[in-house]
Amino acid sequence: MYTLESVNWPGDISKMKLTTKGRYAVTAMLDLALHFDQGAVTLAEIAKRQGISLSYLEQLFAKLRRNGLVDSVRGPGGGYNLARAPEEITVASIIFAINENVDIRKCAGEQNCEGDTKCLTHQLWEDLSQRISDFLTNITLGDLVSQPNVQEVAKRQSIRTELASA
């Protein structure tokens, strides 16, 4: 399932810092993956289930679409679908698609943590940043969808959303 094996990733993955934008993008994409076989999902549905602002989702999905992770469907019954199977979309690809990074180093890889030199713990934080990147590169939406706790939360969210709509 999840491993910490080194994986080659295009671009500079040594600079990582996960913000709310990254968490929301992963959450919204996981919501799409949970409804993968049910046709297009509207951003309004995702917003309601996940408690994320609709306008914020619109901004995120514009980037996700430009990066080939989602397809949009226009007209009645329109919304968004995953562009590929959940098993083919990694958490890292979602984070990088919205121009996020996950870097725990003070210097963001510039090796100037202490003036113009590396700090005492620079290598520790660099190694940890790489492991986080490797970890996220090895987790797919399919992996997350198959987790019992994710299924349990998704079921609770669906019930809550149905009750609120009634």
Image: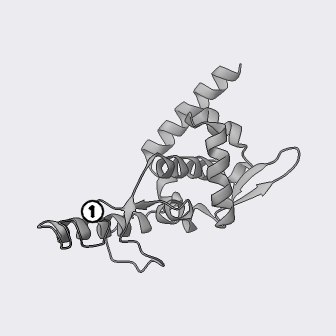
Looking at the picture, which amino acid does disc 1 mark? Arg
Residue at the extreme front: 115
- Name the residue nearer the viewer: 161 or 24: 24
Identified at 43% across, 62% down, the residue is 101
Q: Residue at horizontal 47%, vertical 44%?
A: 150
92 left or right, relative to 29: left
- Residue 135: % across, % down: 36, 65
**Few, some or many residues within 10 Å of mark 1 (<14, 14–19, 20+):** many
As helix, strand or loop, the secondary structure at mark 1 comes to loop
x and y, in percent, of residue 29 in the image:
58, 52
The N terminus - image quarter = bottom left
Q: Quadrant of the C terminus?
A: top right
In this rendering, position of residue 114 left or right of residue 148: left
When the figure is inspected, residue 18 is found, relative to residue 107, above or below; the finding is above
Residue shown at 34%/77% (left/top)? Answer: 6
The residue that appears at 52% across and 46% down in the rendered structure is 24
Residue behind mark 1: 105
Residue 2 visible, this orientation: no
How many numbered marks appear? 1
Q: Give how far across and how far down residue 115 sits, in percent.
A: 19, 67
**Relative to 8, residue 137 above or below:** above
